[in-house]
Image (cartoon, rainbow, N blue to C red):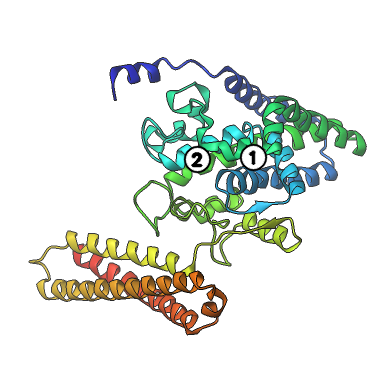
């Protein structure tokens, strides 16, 4: 990095709106909230609405700002987009346009020390919230990557009136609900302050902890991790290693047992006509990526092994790995052939006939074959790790 760039980072001016916001909310949580909780009783209604708005604002970020607008993983009815727009503003994480534009840069430049707006390479604090406290060069706004969003009237309405919408949603809405239930102070503390601080930091976990803590079953080309614990706090966004390689999938947790309420919300919205064109990565492509990563892991473990320690066992493991590599190449070749057949069928307007042909059975057989290979490679990796120990 050049000296000019060094200087720009070192002398980056404070982002005063963010500094003031985080100072006020942190100070409020450390002083006003504990005092109020000690001297007052929170009503049951306040706690119920706290949970409602925690999930509502949180999933308006994950399902709206993130999967809908930043990644175009599905399309939504205008009524659902308005809900996302209002509750997203309530999260005080900037407008849809700014949030999505910067997030697209993050994916394009992930982990780049100078170009990723919240690069994990600059440390946990920086990626969590430090990047927002100063006007760093990587945070410079440029909407060239968001021209599609600039054509969305709901996005642009919120962008133009963001401050007013955000203030109304964060102050007026909790106060009005509190007035209706006779607990204005309790609603302002729970639905207003506590909900805001928690929802912000839960989102920030995705940029910070999800790039430091967890497993990498799909790729090691970036720092993103899959983490089941983080998924519980981030409405399903914890499967970040998957997301960074398959960002256009409307799901993050792809298995039924993986906690991804955002995925379930989108699927539910699709059932009642509020969401459509949901994008999913084909199962074969997912399996192929997992097997490829297992092959890499097995190769890494075998490279660490000491040949003189167990020469016979090591040679056997290397032979097994070569066989698995050959098998993987054969499966990939067969898949490519089937995709070419599908493309040609589409050109001849026979796509529906192709989908119902034996080709579908062949694809399922390939998926099963990859699944079995993934299991064999997991065992092979463990054996190679033992040989390297």
The front one of 81 and 308 is: 81
Image spot of residue 10 (x, y percent): 38, 17
Left or right for 233, reference 190: left
Outermost residue, bottom direction?
358
Left or right for 83, reference 136: right
The front one of 61 and 214 is: 61
Tell me the residue that label 1 is attached to.
199
Left or right for 70, reference 209: right
Between label 1 and label 2, give the one nearer the viewer. 2
Outermost residue, front direction?
348
The answer to whether residue 254 is above or below residue 342 is above
Q: Quadrant of residue 372?
A: bottom left
Tell me the residue that label 2 is attached to.
104
Count neighbours of disc 2 (C-alpha within 10 A) and say few if under 14, some if 14 to 19, many if 20 or more. some
Q: Earlier in the sequence, mark 1 or mark 2?
A: 2
Image spot of residue 134 (x, y percent): 49, 21
The front one of 161 and 7 is: 161
The answer to whether residue 301 is above or below residue 205 is below
Image spot of residue 127 (x, y percent): 46, 35
Q: Is residue 379 visible?
A: no
Residue beneath the point at 18% across and 60% down? 303
Secondary structure under the numbered disc 2 in the rendered image: helix
Secondary structure under the numbered disc 1 in the rendered image: helix
The answer to whether residue 52 is above or below residue 86 is below
Cα distance between the residues tagged 1 and 2: 21 Å
Quadrant (top left/top right/bottom left/bottom right) for the C terminus: bottom left
């Amino acid at each position: 990095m050049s000296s000019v760039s060094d200087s720009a980072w070192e002398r980056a001016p404070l982002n005063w709106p963010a500094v003031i916001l985080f100072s006020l909310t942190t100070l409020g949580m450390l002083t006003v909230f504990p005092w109020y909780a000690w001297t007052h009783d929170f009503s049951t209604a306040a706690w119920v609405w706290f949970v409602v708005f925690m999930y509502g604002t949180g999933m308006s970020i994950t399902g709206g700002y993130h999967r809908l607008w930043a990644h175009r993983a599905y399309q939504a009815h205008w009524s659902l987009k308005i809900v996302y727009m209002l509750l997203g503003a309530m999260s005080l994480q900037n407008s849809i346009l700014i949030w999505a534009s910067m997030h697209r840069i993050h994916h394009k430049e992930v982990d780049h020390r100078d170009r990723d707006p919240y690069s994990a390479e600059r440390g946990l604090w920086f990626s969590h919230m430090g990047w927002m406290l100063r006007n760093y060069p990587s945070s410079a706004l440029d909407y060239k990557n968001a021209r599609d969003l600039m054509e969305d009237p709901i996005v642009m309405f919120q962008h133009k009136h963001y401050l007013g919408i955000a203030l109304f949603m964060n102050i007026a809405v909790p106060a009005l609900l509190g007035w209706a239930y006779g607990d204005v102070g309790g609603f302002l503390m729970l639905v207003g302050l506590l909900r805001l601080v928690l929802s912000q930091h839960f989102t920030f976990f995705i940029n910070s902890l999800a790039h430091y803590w967890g497993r990498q079953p799909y790729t090691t080309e970036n720092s993103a991790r899959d983490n089941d614990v983080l998924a519980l706090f981030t409405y399903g966004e914890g499967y970040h290693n998957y997301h960074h390689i398959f960002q256009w999938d409307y799901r993050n947790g792809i298995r039924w047992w993986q906690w991804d309420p955002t995925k379930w919300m989108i699927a539910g919205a699709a059932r009642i006509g509020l969401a459509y064109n949901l994008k999913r990565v084909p199962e074969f492509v997912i399996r192929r990526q997992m097997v490829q990563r297992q092959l890499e892991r097995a190769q890494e473990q075998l490279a660490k092994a000491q040949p003189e320690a167990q020469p016979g066992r090591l040679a056997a493991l290397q032979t097994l790995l070569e066989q698995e590599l050959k098998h993987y190449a054969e499966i990939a070749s067969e898949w490519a052939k089937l995709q070419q057949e599908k493309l040609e069928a589409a050109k001849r307007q026979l796509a529906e006939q192709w989908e119902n042909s034996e080709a579908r059975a062949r694809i399922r057989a390939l998926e099963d074959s990859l699944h079995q290979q993934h299991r064999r490679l997991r065992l092979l990796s463990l054996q190679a790790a033992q040989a390297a120990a």
